[in-house]
Amino acid sequence: MKTEPSTVAVSDITPVKFDELYSKYNKTLSCPCSTISMPHKIFVSNTIKLHPVCKSIFVNQSWIEALYLLNASQYGVWDFRTTASSQANTVFHIENDVGNNDFITTYLLTDTQVELEVNSTMESSKNSASARIIMFLNYLRTTVRGNVLVSALNTNLIIGTSDRANNIVRAVVFSVKYYLTSGVIMSCNQDNPTSAATLNLLLNDAMSAFSIEFFQSMPNSTIVSGFFAGCTPLEALLQSTLDCLYEIECLQLLSDYFPFLNHVCITLF
């Protein structure tokens, strides 16, 4: 006697009914999905351990806006006021890209199969995240320096005007430079120098063009603990340890130079 397979359609599928059918007919059961793709964040709950700074007021939009100064480029390259807002904004965007990958399947899966698929995807993402971030940062840093892209904050190139004879005004460009310990002068299109970020009461108007052009803080400047100045806000942030954000005295110093911080409620770690 010869038996032939037959197809039986079952309607009104529920999770319980699907599990019953799968336990009996797992080799032949077919249950196509009407929707084959959805973001993991819809059904996956992540417990993510963040650096204390990444879940603090210091990546909040109110903090970033309070650090913003309309005249930021009037301060020297070494002055923390020049890049403070940009550095805080960089941290905000780095930690704001979690859970947007899609889970894709054409057929209904059991709870166990879904769990295995999701765990595998999450583990792969976790292992590759560090490598992808480092590759992107290296690409970005090489592109900026290799193409001499100009920072809007005048931190790698300083653009100004020069009065000439016959009432002609010309644009002039100065590459920001620094001294090596050997006495050799290097510029931002040759390397990625950094120096301790400082705060000083003087504006560019009170400084000579020569001093503005160099990574050389003014006398009697106050160092912002754990923060650096660099050719771009990103280069400065990559060297920073953020120590100031853990120190009451340093936060008070910031409020003295960034008046709008006095309107932001700060909770320490």
Image (cartoon, rainbow, N blue to C red):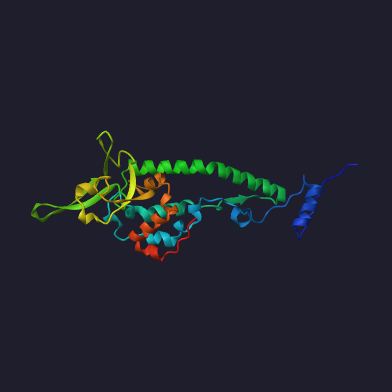
Across and down, in percent, residue 80 comes to 33, 52
Across and down, in percent, residue 173 comes to 22, 48
Return the residue found at the far right.
1
Residue 86 position by quadrant: bottom left
Q: Residue at x 42, y 49 (%)?
A: 243
Across and down, in percent, residue 22 comes to 78, 49
- Horizontal relation, residue 88 to residue 39: left or right: left
Instruction: Depth check: give the residue in front, 7 or 68.
Output: 68
Return the residue found at the far left.
166
- Horizontal relation, residue 96 to residue 34: left or right: left
Across and down, in percent, residue 75 comes to 27, 54
Q: Residue at x 37, y 64 (%)?
A: 260
Return the residue found at the far front.
249
Return the residue found at the far bottom.
263
Instruction: Depth check: give the residue in front, 248 or 177.
Output: 248
- Horizontal relation, residue 214 to residue 139: left or right: left
Q: Quadrant of the N terminus?
A: top right
Query: Is residue 117 at all visible to an observer of this figure?
Result: yes
Query: Is residue 39 at all visible to an observer of this figure?
Result: no
Instruction: Depth check: give the residue in front, 165 or 220.
Output: 220
Q: How many marks?
A: 0
